[in-house]
């Protein structure tokens, strides 16, 4: 089963709509009841880090997503990417800690948040990106960015004042700072690649 974790933050229906356009079924789920290690999970979201953590905790998703093995396919989008990490400067609570990274705020830039279309460049070849697309543009809206403990977990970068990690991976856990559901053909390509990853 493909499950979209519905924390009531942002618009998870837009993710489901794009998945359905690609010919796949996806369920919006407010709780993890009945979910297994063999299911796939997408964690979308827009909003504050601590509020996202609280909603994961009160719904039962926090314990469930911490307990599934590294082989379980998880994709975090925007706030969902941040929740997969250890912590964020935006709040005081601990994240899911599935990826050894923390999030820090952009500093010294004329415009924060980083909002709009920007180029995402692979820092290493990863099957989530279609190699036949030479330049990838995605839609961003965020004020914090990932700093990975191990640079090998950073699979893509973007320039905004400086170069930052815009996608990371550990095992089958992925996080993307941009919004593929708002990124037209580039987002459709990324979802297609992720859905095609072997179980």
Image: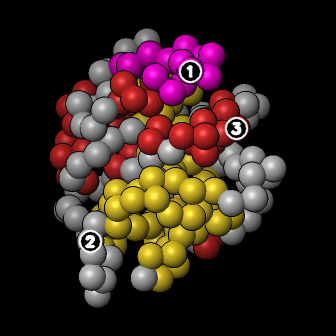
Q: The N terminus lies in which quarter of the figure?
A: top right
Few, some or many residues within 10 Å of mark 1 (<14, 14–19, 20+) = few
Above or below, comparing residue 58 to residue 152 in the picture: above
- Label 3 sits on a secondary structure element that is helix
Classify residue 23 by image quadrant.
Answer: top right
Residue visible at 61% across and 40% down? 185
| Comparing labels 3 and 1, the label whose residue is closer to the camera | 1
Comparing labels 2 and 3, the label whose residue is closer to the camera: 2
2 or 3: tag closer to the N-terminus: 2
Q: How is the image coloured?
A: secondary structure
**Looking at the picture, how far across and down is residue 72, in whole percent?**
60, 34
Dot 3 or dot 1: first in sequence order is 1
Front residue of this view, candidates 9 and 14: 14
> Viewer-proximal residue, 143 or 61?
143
For label 2, the SS is loop
Q: Which residue is mark 1?
A: 21
Is 170 included in the stretch rendered in magenta?
Answer: no
Disc 2, disc 3: CB below 8 Å?
no
Residue 114 screen position, x and y as percent? 35, 67
Report how far apart the C-alphas of labels 2 and 1 lie in the structure. Answer: 33 Å
Q: Which residue is mark 3?
A: 193
Name the foreground residue: 119 vs 15.
119
The mark found on residue 131 in the picture is none
Q: Which residues are magenta?
A: 17-29
Q: Is residue 188 above or below residue 25?
A: below
């Amino acid at each position: 089963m493909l499950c979209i974790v519905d924390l009531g933050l942002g618009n998870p229906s837009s993710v489901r709509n794009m998945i359905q356009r690609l010919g796949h079924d996806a369920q919006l789920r407010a709780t993890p009841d009945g979910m297994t290690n063999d299911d796939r999970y997408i964690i979308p979201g827009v909003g504050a880090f601590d509020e996202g953590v609280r909603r994961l905790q009160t719904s039962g998703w926090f314990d469930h997503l911490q307990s599934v093995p590294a082989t379980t396919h998880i994709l975090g989008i925007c706030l969902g990417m941040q929740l997969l990490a250890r912590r964020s400067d935006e709040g005081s609570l601990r994240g899911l800690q599935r990826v050894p990274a923390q999030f820090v705020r952009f500093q010294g830039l004329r415009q924060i948040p980083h909002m709009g279309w920007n180029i995402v460049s692979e820092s290493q070849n990863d099957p989530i990106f279609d190699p036949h697309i030479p330049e990838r543009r995605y839609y961003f809206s965020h004020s914090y960015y990932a700093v990975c403990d191990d640079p090998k977990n950073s699979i893509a970068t973007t320039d905004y004042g400086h170069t930052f990690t815009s996608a990371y991976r550990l095992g089958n856990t992925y996080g993307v700072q941009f919004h593929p559901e708002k990124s037209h053909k580039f987002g459709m390509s990324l979802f297609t690649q992720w859905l095609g990853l072997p179980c």
